[in-house]
Image (spheres, rainbow, N blue to C red):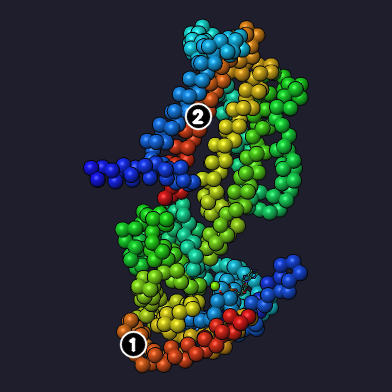
């Protein structure tokens, strides 16, 4: 009895402690809480639409959205749209990374190169990529080149600046250790700055890939014949909020999956950071 | 002229904003013969690291000259190896790869580098840790690896800046004996030249042929004593009367400087 009471007492106490700042919670509790939010969210959504509080014209119910999704796949080749969008994001993102990562590394390593590019790039990265769409259509038409250009424009300057900051912050004591081991200029870049920066650079790329998803949809809302953004635009014409919502959710899910893949790739590539 | 030769070396650091510049080293002269083991003692902030970094080529003197084996020192080079007090292993390389860094950088093949690394892994007692990442190692093991990494490059002079400063007392004593062993206490003809900075008097005397005491900032060499103990040495010498006499002498010298440093 007494023991039971005391244990109970302890549990109460630890229950109170879980609200203490920075105190970790158990993995099980973490998953349960994460799922709980989705349940609350879906419940609220179903209630708002089911009770007639909101007209179906403006917001479809969760079930409507799901069945609209089904017909998208079955009748409208939605897989093709998804493939198109993924390809545009990855294409634009990879081109941007191929330009920006080397440039950022050079800027971080060599202060002269940094002084040359940094002011312009700091300015350019505040130019909103979406505002360039009309201009890009004028230059490149409404084909794939224009879509890729939007994503490249939106990502490249961000990546350059982030990579330059990361490379510039390489631990000086490691650079000095390499010097005393006989390294010179290029060797320092290749064997110290790049490997030291690599994990954070990959994290920066993961972040920018998330942003690239928002640019591609904007690019597809205007002047596109395919893609998730184009489908959402079409659905608006048909006043099909179910399809629109389903499209938005699909974007979220793909983003979540790529993010997860990216994270696990980073963990595999840079096991030493996790120690 | 062979060995290390320092003449009229000074270093002052520009002050921040309108502050006056900091004079870290007063004109300093020093000669070290090849194969000699010299310890440098001094209160913290007296310019010991500054002097070592200048010899390594990581920093430039304000005035004066440094020559190693007759060559003027203007930049880092692999003939002058260094071990730092802070842990500076490359965290993305394993113990083995860290030790291979120098040989690889001078163009050794993968097989050659692995052979060299194996030799120094054995010599520094790192067997079984080849595949560990630096973060998985204790401080003592990390400094062993740093020492092996410097030695694998076959430097002519070793610059050691309080390499055992962050280690506990027992580990430290083990590392001192290890250092004497790899230095070549029992192989006089193969000895490397060593400049060893420390603020531990026992350590300075136990290791060196010669002990220098630096004054409080701005640093200069205040006292210079030869250590009348023969190699090889083991920890027992720390109980000998000669050792105690040296220690007493150095202690009074240093106390005076530490007091001056503390009073500003
Ligand atoms: N990069 C630097 N910039 C300005 N002052 C420095 C710099 N490095 C060292 N100093 C100053 O020079 C003096 C000697 O430093 P240091 O050589 O590190 O001393 P020690 O190694 O003997 O403790 C200190 O007062 C320190 O503040
Ligand atoms: Mg120091």
- Examine the rendered structure and indicate whether residue B205 appears above or below residue B129: below
| Along the line of sight, the residue nearer the viewer: A43 or B59 | A43
Residue occupying image coordinates x 44% and y 71%: B164
| Number of residues whose C-alpha sits closer than 10 Å to that of mark 1, classed few (under 14), some (14–19) or many (20 or more) | few
Residue under the point 51% across and 81% down: B40
Q: Quadrant of residue B30?
A: bottom right
SS at mark 2 in the image:
helix
Q: Mark 1 lies on which chain?
A: B
Q: Residue A80 versus residue B99: which sits nearer the camera?
A: A80
Q: Can residue B116 be seen in this view?
A: no
The residue beneath circle 1 is B239
Which residue in the protein does label 2 denote?
A256
Q: Residue at image x 46%, y 52%?
A: B92
- Quadrant in the rendering for residue A137: top right
- In front here: B30 or B207? B207
- Left or right of B21? Residue A193 is left
Are labels 1 and 2 assigned to the same chain?
no
Q: Mark 2 lies on which chain?
A: A
Q: Where is residue B15 in the image (x, y as percent from the top left)?
A: 71, 70
Queried on whether the Cβ of the residue with tag 2 lies below 8 angstroms from ligand 1, the answer reads no
Question: Where ligand 2 lies, by image quadrant?
Answer: bottom right
Q: In which quarter of the image is residue A130?
A: top right
Q: Position of residue B62 (x, y in %)?
A: 68, 75
Q: Spot the residue most to the front.
A: A2
Q: Crowding near pointer 2: few (<14 within 10 Å), some, many (20+)?
A: few
Looking at the image, is B97 positioned above or below residue B216?
above
Which residue is painted at 42% across and 57% down in the image?
B134
Q: Is mark 1 on a helix, strand or loop?
A: helix
Q: How far apart are marks 1 and 2 (CA)?
A: 67 Å
């Amino acid at each position: 009895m007494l023991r039971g009471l005391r244990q109970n007492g302890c549990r109460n106490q630890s229950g109170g402690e879980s609200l203490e700042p920075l105190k970790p919670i158990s993995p099980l509790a973490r998953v349960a809480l994460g799922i709980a939010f989705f349940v609350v969210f879906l419940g609220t959504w179903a209630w708002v639409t089911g009770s007639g509080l909101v007209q179906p014209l403006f917001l479809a119910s969760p079930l409507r959205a799901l069945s609209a999704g089904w017909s998208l796949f079955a009748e409208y080749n939605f897989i093709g749209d998804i493939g198109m969008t993924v390809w545009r994001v990855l294409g634009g993102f990879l081109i941007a990374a191929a330009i920006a990562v080397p440039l950022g590394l050079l800027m971080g390593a060599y202060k002269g190169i940094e002084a040359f590019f940094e002011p312009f790039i700091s300015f350019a990265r505040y130019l909103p990529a979406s505002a360039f769409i009309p201009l890009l259509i004028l230059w490149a038409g409404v084909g794939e080149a224009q879509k890729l250009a939007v994503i490249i424009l939106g990502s490249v300057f961000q990546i350059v600046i982030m990579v330059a900051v990361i490379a510039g912050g390489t631990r000086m004591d490691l650079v000095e250790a390499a010097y005393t081991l006989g390294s010179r200029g290029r060797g320092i870049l290749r064997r110290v700055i790049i490997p030291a920066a690599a994990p954070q650079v990959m994290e920066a790329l993961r972040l920018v890939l998330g942003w690239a998803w928002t640019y591609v949809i904007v690019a597809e809302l205007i002047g596109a014949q395919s893609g998730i953004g184009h489908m959402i635009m079409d659905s608006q014409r048909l006043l099909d909020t179910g399809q629109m919502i389903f499209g938005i959710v699909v974007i979220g899910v793909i983003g979540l999956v790529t993010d997860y893949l990216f994270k696990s790739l980073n963990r595999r590539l840079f096991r030493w950071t996790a120690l | 002229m062979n060995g290390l030769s320092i003449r009229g070396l000074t270093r002052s650091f520009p002050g921040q904003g309108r502050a006056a510049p900091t004079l870290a080293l007063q004109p300093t002269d020093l000669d070290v013969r090849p194969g000699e083991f010299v310890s440098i003692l001094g209160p913290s902030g007296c310019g010991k690291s500054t002097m070592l970094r200048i010899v390594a080529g990581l920093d430039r003197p304000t005035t004066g000259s440094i020559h190693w084996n007759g060559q003027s020192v203007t930049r880092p080079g692999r003939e002058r190896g260094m071990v730092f007090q802070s842990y500076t292993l490359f965290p993305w390389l394993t113990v083995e790869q860290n030790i291979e860094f120098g040989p690889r950088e001078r163009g050794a093949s993968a097989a050659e580098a692995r052979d060299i690394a194996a030799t120094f892994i054995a010599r520094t007692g790192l067997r079984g840790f080849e595949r560990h990442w630096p973060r998985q190692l204790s401080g003592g093991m990390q400094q062993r690896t740093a020492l092996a990494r410097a030695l694998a490059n076959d430097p002519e002079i070793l610059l050691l800046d309080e390499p055992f400063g962050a280690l506990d007392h027992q580990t430290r004593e083990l590392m001192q004996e290890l250092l004497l062993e790899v230095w070549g206490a029992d192989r006089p003809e193969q000895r490397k030249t060593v400049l060893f900075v420390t603020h531990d008097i026992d350590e300075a005397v136990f290791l060196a042929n010669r002990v220098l005491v630096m004054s409080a900032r701005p640093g200069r060499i205040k006292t210079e004593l030869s250590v009348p103990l023969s190699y090889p040495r083991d920890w027992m010498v720390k109980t000998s009367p000669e050792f105690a006499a040296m220690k007493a002498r150095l202690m009074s010298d240093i106390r005076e400087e530490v007091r001056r440093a503390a009073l500003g």
